[in-house]
Image (cartoon, rainbow, N blue to C red):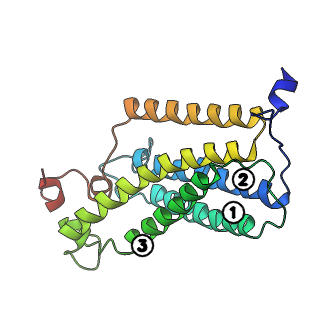
C-alpha cells in the first residue's frame, strides 16, 4: 500500500521535479486549495459569530479581516508561485501535450484574482447610521453596490471551480505521487462536508444584515 501511495499517478512518466516546480506546486495549492476556500467560508458563514448576540451586537469585523487576509495572502502566494515556474531553469520531464490547459487555467485564475481585488476597491462607499454620513452605496444598496455583489460573488465561486481544475491538471503534469492526490481529495471532501454542515446549521446572514441588522427601516432590507 505504501509503495502504491508513493508511486506516481502515471508509471509511464517521470516524476522528477526540481526546487522551483515543487515550490510552485506548494504555493499554489496553499493559495487556491486552502486559503481561498477558507476565505470564502469565512465570508459566507461567519459574518455573525456563533457566540455573538446578533442583532443586538452588530458589525463584527472578524469575518471581514479573515476574508481579506486569506484572499490577499492567496494572491501573494500565487504571484510567488508564478515567479517560481517562470524562472524554473530545469526541464520538466513529466509534461504531456495537454500542459497548455494547466497554463490557461493558471493565468485565468490570476486574472480572476485581480478582478476580485479591483471589484473590491471599486465597491463604493459604505454609509449607514454608524458611518460619518448616512448615505452610501452599501447602505442604500445602489446599482453600483448591487453590481459589485453580483460580480464579486460570481467570480469568487468561479475562481474556486477553476482552482480545483488547475490543481488537478497541475498534479497530472507533475505526475504527482498518489498520496498527493489522495490527500487533496480528502481535504476537499472535508471542505465540502464543512460547507454542508454549516449550510444546515447556520443561516447565512447577508453582509447588510450583519452590519446593520434585519430592521426593515434600513433601505437595503426593503429590497426584494
Residue denoted by label 3: 118
50 left or right, relative to 7? left
Residue denoted by label 2: 25
Q: Earlier in the sequence, mark 2 or mark 1?
A: 2
Secondary element at tag 1: helix
Q: Give the Cα separation between the discs numbered 2 and 1.
A: 7 Å
In the displayed structure, 196 sits above or below 127; it is above
Residue in view at x 80 percent, y 28 percent: 5
102 left or right, relative to 172? left
Picture disc at residue 81:
1
The local crowd at label 1, few if under 14, some if 14 to 19, many if 20 or more residues have their Cα within 10 Å, is many
Residue 91 coordinates in the image, percent (x, y):
82, 59
Residue 69 seen by the camera: yes
Residue farthest toward the front in the current orientation of the protein: 97
Q: Nearer the viewer, residue 161 or 105?
A: 105
Secondary element at tag 3: helix
Amino acid at each position: 500500500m505504501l509503495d502504491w501511495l508513493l508511486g506516481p499517478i502515471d508509471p509511464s512518466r517521470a516524476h522528477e521535479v526540481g526546487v522551483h516546480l515543487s515550490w510552485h506546486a506548494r504555493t499554489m495549492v496553499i493559495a487556491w486549495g486552502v486559503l481561498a476556500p477558507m476565505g470564502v467560508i469565512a465570508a459566507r458563514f461567519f459574518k455573525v459569530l456563533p457566540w455573538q448576540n446578533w442583532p443586538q451586537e452588530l458589525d463584527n469585523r472578524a469575518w471581514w479581516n479573515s476574508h481579506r487576509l486569506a484572499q490577499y495572502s492567496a494572491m501573494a502566494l500565487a504571484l510567488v508561485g508564478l515567479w517560481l515556474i517562470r524562472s524554473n531553469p530545469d526541464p520538466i520531464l513529466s509534461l504531456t501535450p495537454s500542459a497548455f490547459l494547466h497554463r490557461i487555467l493558471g493565468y485565468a485564475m490570476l486574472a480572476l484574482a485581480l478582478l476580485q481585488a479591483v471589484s473590491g476597491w471599486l465597491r463604493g462607499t459604505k454609509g449607514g447610521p454608524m458611518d460619518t454620513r448616512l448615505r452610501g452605496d452599501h447602505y442604500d444598496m445602489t446599482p453600483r453596490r448591487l453590481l459589485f455583489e453580483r460580480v464579486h460573488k460570481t467570480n469568487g465561486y468561479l475562481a474556486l471551480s477553476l482552482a480545483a481544475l488547475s490543481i488537478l491538471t497541475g498534479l497530472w503534469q507533475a505526475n504527482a505521487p498518489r498520496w498527493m492526490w489522495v490527500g487533496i481529495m480528502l481535504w476537499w471532501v472535508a471542505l465540502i462536508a464543512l460547507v454542508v454542515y454549516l449550510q444546515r446549521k447556520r443561516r447565512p446572514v447577508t453582509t447588510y444584515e450583519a452590519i446593520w441588522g434585519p430592521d426593515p427601516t434600513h433601505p437595503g432590507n426593503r429590497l426584494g
